[in-house]
């Protein structure tokens, strides 16, 4: 059995909530690969997983009426824009996949009194026959950067993801999206723009990073976006960093499988004072994949995605000022 098989088996045990068995297999893996920071972080989390159980948040799944997976909520107007299974492909999905299958589209979901209304196709200019993924709106909702599959395959015979930008015209229609960066032979996706619309954060599997996919940033200066800069080892790991988001005060949230946690992708926040990554804990994180968070600090509430119930779905959460009873996941 290869060391990588041992690592993946330990990861699956963690995602299944079998923490004691997972620790044993991470130990076996580290005997072979003693310098792997992913396994060290996972083992440290499993030794102290009780510290990741939080009672700060009340979490509730949103009943969005779309078949298949629904993920990456983004506030827009009086509702959310979500990524959902479209009419141009299948509905199976793996969070960290970068190729063209399956295809997803963007949908607008109105929210009233905390309850989702009927989803509708967002816009024919923003959706295409290829994959549309997470988006970020800025300039009071008049501009959007979205993830889209490239129209042609790259040198490795896969269709990479790219970032596209579009503007809302006076007619109320969106302009044809144009590329944010030159068409590279790697993927850029999962954009997040700061409140001023001057900095975009995104995930990329660009060669030369720290792991499978890293987080990068680019600034808007003199009418163009600068060459992306890697956020460095304080943020990125040997694993995958995905789905960044910036709140109204500039705090960075993202998901990673390289820092341990409760299993799968966990959501972290970068502490602005220490620049350290802080796990948000259960019930926002779970033994499954948790990602695509949006934190509306001024409202003390937000949204995120998780496959904890068997498929990717959108959840709402709000911070509660008093202690609440929570259920600790099985170990």
Image: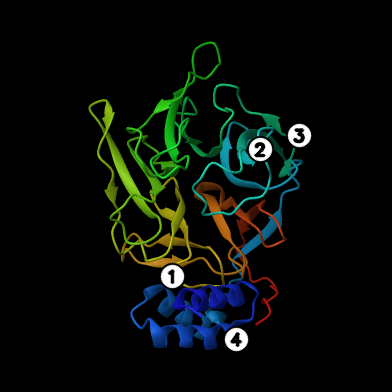
Label 4 crowding class (10 Å Cα cut-off): few <14, some 14-19, many 20+? some
Find residue 125 and report its horizontal and vertical position in percent: 55, 21
Asked if disc 3 and disc 2 are in contact, CB closer than 8 Å, the reply is no
Q: Write down the residue under mark 4.
A: 21
Label 1 crowding class (10 Å Cα cut-off): few <14, some 14-19, many 20+? many
Q: How far apart are the two marked residues, 4 and 1, measured between alpha carbons?
A: 19 Å
Q: Write down the residue under mark 2.
A: 89
Between 254 and 14, which is closer to the camera in this rendering?
14
Q: Is residue 82 above or below residue 174?
A: below
Asked if disc 1 and disc 3 are in contact, CB closer than 8 Å, the reply is no
> Which of the 4 image quarters holds residue 210?
bottom left
- Sequence-first disc among 3 and 2: 2
Q: Name the residue at 31% across, 57% down.
A: 209
Between 74 and 42, which is closer to the camera in this rendering?
42
Q: Write down the residue under mark 1.
A: 259
Find residue 136 and report its horizontal and vertical position in percent: 48, 37
Element under disc 3: loop
Q: How far apart are the two marked residues, 4 and 2, measured between alpha carbons?
A: 38 Å
- Sequence-first disc among 4 and 1: 4
For the C terminus, the image quarter is bottom right
Instruction: State whether residue 55 appears in this view.
Output: yes
Element under disc 2: loop
Q: Is residue 3 left or right of residue 302?
A: left
């Amino acid at each position: 059995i290869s060391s990588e098989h041992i690592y993946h088996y330990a990861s699956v045990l963690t995602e299944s909530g079998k923490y004691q068995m997972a620790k044993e297999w991470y130990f076996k893996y580290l005997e072979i690969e003693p310098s792997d920071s992913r396994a060290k972080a996972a083992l440290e989390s499993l030794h102290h997983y009780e510290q990741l159980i939080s009672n700060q948040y009340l979490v509730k799944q949103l009943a969005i009426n779309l078949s298949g997976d629904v993920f990456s909520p983004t506030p827009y107007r009086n509702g959310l824009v979500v990524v959902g299974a479209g009419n141009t492909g299948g509905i199976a999905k793996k969070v960290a996949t970068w190729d063209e299958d399956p295809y997803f589209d963007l949908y607008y979901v109105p929210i009233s009194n905390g309850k989702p209304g009927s989803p509708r196709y967002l816009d024919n200019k923003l959706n295409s026959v290829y994959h549309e993924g997470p988006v970020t709106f800025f300039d009071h909702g008049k501009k959007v950067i979205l993830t889209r599959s490239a129209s042609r395959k790259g040198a490795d015979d896969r269709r990479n993801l790219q970032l596209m930008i579009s503007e809302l015209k006076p007619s109320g229609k969106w302009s044809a999206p144009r590329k944010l960066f030159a068409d590279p032979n790697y993927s850029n996706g999962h954009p997040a723009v700061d409140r001023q619309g001057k900095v975009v954060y995104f995930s990329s599997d660009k060669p030369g990073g720290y792991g499978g996919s890293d987080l990068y940033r680019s600034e808007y200066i003199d009418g163009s976006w600068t060459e992306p800069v890697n956020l460095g080892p304080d943020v990125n790991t040997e694993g995958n960093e995905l789905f960044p988001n910036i709140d109204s005060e500039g705090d960075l949230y993202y998901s990673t499988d390289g820092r341990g946690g409760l299993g799968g992708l966990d959501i972290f926040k970068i502490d602005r004072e220490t620049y350290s990554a802080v796990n948000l804990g259960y019930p926002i994180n779970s033994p499954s994949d948790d990602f695509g968070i949006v934190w509306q600090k001024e409202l003390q509430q937000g949204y995120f995605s998780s496959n904890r119930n068997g498929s990717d779905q959108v959840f709402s959460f709000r911070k509660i000022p008093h202690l609440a009873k929570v259920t600790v996941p099985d170990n």
